[in-house]
Amino acid sequence: QKEVEQNSGPLSVPEGAIASLNCTYSDRGSQSFFWYRQYSGKSPELIMSIYSNGDKEDGRFTAQLNKASQYVSLLIRDSQPSDSATYLCAVEGYQKVTFGTGTKLQVIP
Amino acid sequence: GAVVSQHPSWVICKSGTSVKIECRSLDFQATTMFWYRQFPKKSLMLMATSNEGSKATYEQGVEKDKFLINHASLTLSTLTVTSAHPEDSSFYICSALGQLSTYEQYFGPGTRLTVT
Protein backbone atom coordinates (compact mmCIF):
# COMPACT_ATOMS: atom_id res chain seq x y z
CA GLN A 1 0.00 0.00 0.00
CA LYS A 2 1.60 3.21 -1.16
CA GLU A 3 1.08 5.90 1.46
CA VAL A 4 1.70 9.57 1.87
CA GLU A 5 1.42 10.87 5.39
CA GLN A 6 0.99 14.37 6.69
CA ASN A 7 0.11 15.81 10.06
CA SER A 8 -3.44 17.14 9.71
CA GLY A 9 -2.75 20.13 11.95
CA PRO A 10 -3.82 22.78 12.32
CA LEU A 11 -0.36 24.28 12.30
CA SER A 12 -0.56 27.79 13.67
CA VAL A 13 2.23 30.29 13.04
CA PRO A 14 2.37 34.05 13.60
CA GLU A 15 2.48 36.37 10.63
CA GLY A 16 6.04 36.81 9.39
CA ALA A 17 7.27 33.50 10.78
CA ILE A 18 8.46 30.45 8.87
CA ALA A 19 5.89 27.70 8.42
CA SER A 20 7.30 24.19 8.06
CA LEU A 21 5.12 21.50 6.55
CA ASN A 22 6.24 17.91 6.47
CA CYS A 23 5.37 14.81 4.50
CA THR A 24 6.63 11.24 4.53
CA TYR A 25 6.02 8.58 1.91
CA SER A 26 6.35 4.84 1.85
CA ASP A 27 7.30 4.02 -1.74
CA ARG A 28 11.06 4.16 -2.25
CA GLY A 29 10.54 4.11 -6.01
CA SER A 30 8.83 7.51 -6.00
CA GLN A 31 10.34 9.97 -8.41
CA SER A 32 8.27 13.14 -8.36
CA PHE A 33 6.97 15.17 -5.46
CA PHE A 34 4.48 18.01 -5.35
CA TRP A 35 2.97 20.50 -2.99
CA TYR A 36 -0.53 21.81 -3.60
CA ARG A 37 -2.37 24.54 -1.75
CA GLN A 38 -6.13 24.26 -1.26
CA TYR A 39 -8.21 27.07 0.12
CA SER A 40 -11.45 26.15 1.83
CA GLY A 41 -14.15 25.38 -0.73
CA LYS A 42 -11.71 25.62 -3.64
CA SER A 43 -9.75 23.13 -5.70
CA PRO A 44 -6.02 22.43 -5.21
CA GLU A 45 -3.41 24.64 -6.84
CA LEU A 46 0.08 23.41 -7.69
CA ILE A 47 2.69 25.53 -5.92
CA MET A 48 5.89 23.47 -6.03
CA SER A 49 7.29 20.38 -7.66
CA ILE A 50 10.63 18.75 -6.83
CA TYR A 51 12.35 15.80 -8.44
CA SER A 52 15.84 15.54 -6.96
CA ASN A 53 17.34 15.58 -3.49
CA GLY A 54 17.99 18.94 -1.94
CA ASP A 55 16.23 22.26 -1.84
CA LYS A 56 14.22 24.06 -4.47
CA GLU A 57 13.26 27.66 -3.89
CA ASP A 58 10.50 29.69 -5.52
CA GLY A 59 9.84 33.05 -3.95
CA ARG A 60 8.81 32.55 -0.33
CA PHE A 61 8.46 28.80 -0.82
CA THR A 62 11.21 26.21 -0.45
CA ALA A 63 10.66 22.52 -1.06
CA GLN A 64 13.11 20.08 0.47
CA LEU A 65 13.50 16.47 -0.58
CA ASN A 66 15.40 13.66 1.11
CA LYS A 67 14.82 10.42 -0.74
CA ALA A 68 16.97 8.38 1.65
CA SER A 69 14.71 9.38 4.54
CA GLN A 70 11.59 9.36 2.32
CA TYR A 71 10.77 12.84 3.46
CA VAL A 72 9.65 15.97 1.69
CA SER A 73 8.92 19.30 3.27
CA LEU A 74 7.68 22.76 2.36
CA LEU A 75 8.94 25.90 4.05
CA ILE A 76 6.99 29.14 3.74
CA ARG A 77 9.00 32.18 4.72
CA ASP A 78 7.44 35.43 5.94
CA SER A 79 4.09 33.71 6.33
CA GLN A 80 1.07 35.82 5.51
CA PRO A 81 -2.58 35.41 6.55
CA SER A 82 -3.30 34.71 2.88
CA ASP A 83 -1.16 31.58 3.19
CA SER A 84 -3.78 30.09 5.51
CA ALA A 85 -4.97 27.01 3.65
CA THR A 86 -4.60 23.26 3.55
CA TYR A 87 -1.36 22.07 1.97
CA LEU A 88 -1.42 18.74 0.17
CA CYS A 89 1.68 16.68 -0.43
CA ALA A 90 1.55 14.47 -3.52
CA VAL A 91 3.98 11.75 -4.54
CA GLU A 92 4.33 10.06 -7.92
CA GLY A 93 5.50 6.52 -8.19
CA TYR A 94 5.08 4.06 -11.06
CA GLN A 95 2.95 6.55 -12.98
CA LYS A 96 0.46 7.08 -10.19
CA VAL A 97 0.13 10.11 -7.95
CA THR A 98 -0.92 9.65 -4.33
CA PHE A 99 -2.09 12.60 -2.25
CA GLY A 100 -1.68 13.02 1.46
CA THR A 101 -4.63 14.13 3.54
CA GLY A 102 -3.19 17.61 3.91
CA THR A 103 -1.97 19.90 6.67
CA LYS A 104 -4.10 22.86 7.62
CA LEU A 105 -2.00 25.99 8.11
CA GLN A 106 -3.27 28.98 10.04
CA VAL A 107 -1.25 32.19 9.92
CA ILE A 108 -2.19 34.41 12.82
CA PRO A 109 -2.05 38.18 12.14
CA GLY B 1 -0.67 28.43 -19.12
CA ALA B 2 -2.08 25.09 -17.85
CA VAL B 3 -5.62 26.31 -17.26
CA VAL B 4 -8.37 23.78 -16.63
CA SER B 5 -12.02 24.73 -16.57
CA GLN B 6 -15.05 22.88 -15.25
CA HIS B 7 -18.70 23.36 -15.97
CA PRO B 8 -20.99 23.79 -14.19
CA SER B 9 -19.43 25.20 -11.03
CA TRP B 10 -22.42 24.07 -9.04
CA VAL B 11 -25.55 22.09 -9.76
CA ILE B 12 -28.62 20.97 -7.86
CA CYS B 13 -30.53 17.99 -9.15
CA LYS B 14 -33.27 15.68 -8.00
CA SER B 15 -32.75 12.08 -6.96
CA GLY B 16 -32.85 9.70 -9.86
CA THR B 17 -31.71 12.18 -12.48
CA SER B 18 -28.34 12.32 -14.24
CA VAL B 19 -25.85 15.14 -14.20
CA LYS B 20 -22.98 15.75 -16.60
CA ILE B 21 -19.86 17.64 -15.58
CA GLU B 22 -17.39 18.87 -18.19
CA CYS B 23 -13.66 19.31 -17.72
CA ARG B 24 -11.64 21.19 -20.33
CA SER B 25 -7.96 21.95 -20.70
CA LEU B 26 -7.97 25.43 -22.21
CA ASP B 27 -4.41 26.04 -23.36
CA PHE B 28 -2.88 22.60 -23.63
CA GLN B 29 -3.71 19.11 -24.75
CA ALA B 30 -4.31 16.62 -22.00
CA THR B 31 -4.15 12.97 -22.92
CA THR B 32 -4.77 12.10 -19.29
CA MET B 33 -7.29 13.63 -16.92
CA PHE B 34 -8.34 12.60 -13.43
CA TRP B 35 -11.63 12.82 -11.58
CA TYR B 36 -11.72 13.29 -7.83
CA ARG B 37 -14.42 13.79 -5.27
CA GLN B 38 -14.00 15.49 -1.94
CA PHE B 39 -16.37 15.54 1.02
CA PRO B 40 -16.28 18.48 3.43
CA LYS B 41 -13.08 18.60 5.47
CA LYS B 42 -11.92 15.33 3.91
CA SER B 43 -9.08 14.52 1.57
CA LEU B 44 -9.21 14.13 -2.18
CA MET B 45 -10.41 10.77 -3.35
CA LEU B 46 -9.36 9.67 -6.81
CA MET B 47 -12.33 8.20 -8.65
CA ALA B 48 -10.90 7.42 -12.05
CA THR B 49 -8.20 8.13 -14.60
CA SER B 50 -9.44 9.23 -17.98
CA ASN B 51 -7.31 8.67 -21.07
CA GLU B 52 -8.20 10.18 -24.41
CA GLY B 53 -9.64 7.65 -26.80
CA SER B 54 -9.79 4.77 -24.35
CA LYS B 55 -11.89 3.55 -21.45
CA ALA B 56 -11.39 5.14 -18.08
CA THR B 57 -9.65 3.29 -15.29
CA TYR B 58 -11.72 3.33 -12.13
CA GLU B 59 -10.42 3.10 -8.59
CA GLN B 60 -11.54 0.27 -6.38
CA GLY B 61 -15.01 0.83 -5.00
CA VAL B 62 -16.08 3.34 -7.65
CA GLU B 63 -19.04 2.13 -9.71
CA LYS B 64 -18.21 2.60 -13.38
CA ASP B 65 -21.86 2.24 -14.41
CA LYS B 66 -22.85 5.04 -12.06
CA PHE B 67 -20.01 7.42 -12.82
CA LEU B 68 -19.66 7.45 -16.59
CA ILE B 69 -16.48 9.01 -17.91
CA ASN B 70 -15.86 9.97 -21.50
CA HIS B 71 -12.63 11.49 -22.83
CA ALA B 72 -13.43 12.00 -26.49
CA SER B 73 -10.88 14.68 -27.28
CA LEU B 74 -7.52 15.93 -26.08
CA THR B 75 -9.16 18.86 -24.32
CA LEU B 76 -12.42 17.49 -22.94
CA SER B 77 -13.40 14.86 -20.42
CA THR B 78 -16.88 14.45 -19.01
CA LEU B 79 -18.20 12.80 -15.87
CA THR B 80 -21.86 11.81 -15.78
CA VAL B 81 -23.38 10.91 -12.45
CA THR B 82 -26.28 8.63 -13.31
CA SER B 83 -29.34 8.02 -11.16
CA ALA B 84 -28.05 10.46 -8.59
CA HIS B 85 -28.73 9.95 -4.91
CA PRO B 86 -28.29 12.37 -2.01
CA GLU B 87 -25.13 10.51 -0.94
CA ASP B 88 -23.59 11.50 -4.29
CA SER B 89 -23.65 15.11 -3.13
CA SER B 90 -20.02 16.18 -3.06
CA PHE B 91 -17.36 18.41 -4.57
CA TYR B 92 -16.17 16.89 -7.85
CA ILE B 93 -12.82 18.07 -9.15
CA CYS B 94 -11.03 17.19 -12.36
CA SER B 95 -7.38 17.60 -13.12
CA ALA B 96 -5.30 17.33 -16.24
CA LEU B 97 -1.78 16.05 -16.61
CA GLY B 98 0.37 18.79 -18.07
CA GLN B 99 3.16 16.58 -19.29
CA LEU B 100 3.54 12.87 -18.79
CA SER B 101 7.19 13.39 -17.95
CA THR B 102 6.53 15.58 -14.92
CA TYR B 103 3.21 14.28 -13.54
CA GLU B 104 2.23 17.80 -12.59
CA GLN B 105 -1.54 17.96 -12.33
CA TYR B 106 -3.54 21.11 -12.95
CA PHE B 107 -6.91 21.18 -11.29
CA GLY B 108 -10.18 22.59 -12.47
CA PRO B 109 -12.15 24.82 -10.10
CA GLY B 110 -14.48 21.99 -9.12
CA THR B 111 -18.20 21.32 -9.33
CA ARG B 112 -20.35 21.27 -6.25
CA LEU B 113 -23.17 18.76 -6.72
CA THR B 114 -26.20 18.72 -4.46
CA VAL B 115 -28.76 15.97 -4.93
CA THR B 116 -32.13 16.61 -3.31
Image (cartoon, coloured by chain):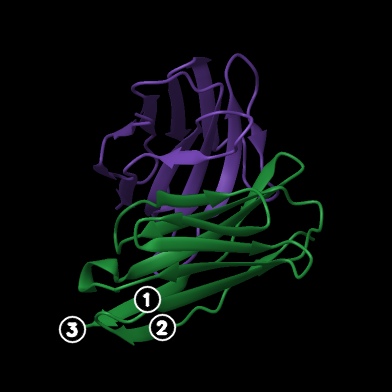
Instruction: Identify the amino acid type marked 3.
Output: Pro
Tell me, yes or no, whether dots 3 and 1 are on the same chain.
yes
Chain containing the residue with disc 3: A
Query: Chain A: what color?
Result: green
Q: Nearer the viewer, residue A82 or A51?
A: A51
Instruction: Identify the amino acid type marked 2.
Output: Pro
Q: Using the rendered view, name the quadrant where residue B40 is placed.
A: bottom left
Mark 1 in CB contact with mark 2 (< 8 angstroms): yes
Instruction: Where is residue A7? Give x, y as percent.
Output: 55, 79
Q: Using the rendered view, name the quadrant where residue A2 is placed.
A: bottom right
Chain containing the residue with disc 1: A
Circle number at residue A109: 3
Query: Chain B: what color?
Result: purple
Query: Cα distance, mark 1 to mark 2?
Result: 6 Å
- Mark 2 is surrounded, within 10 Å at the Cα level, by few (under 14), some (14 to 19) or many (20 or more) other residues, namely some
Chain containing the residue with disc 2: A
Circle number at residue A30: none
- Specify the farthest residue to the left: A109
**Residue B83 visible, this orientation:** no
Side (left or right) of B92 relative to B35: left
Query: Cα distance, mark 3 to mark 1?
Result: 13 Å
Give whichever of discs 1 and 2 has the lower sequence position: 2
Residue under circle 2? A10
Residue at the location (46% across, 82% down)? A9
Q: Using the rendered view, name the quadrant where residue B65 is placed.
A: top right
Mark nearest the camera among 3 and 1 is: 3
Residue under circle 1? A105
- Mark 3 is surrounded, within 10 Å at the Cα level, by few (under 14), some (14 to 19) or many (20 or more) other residues, namely few
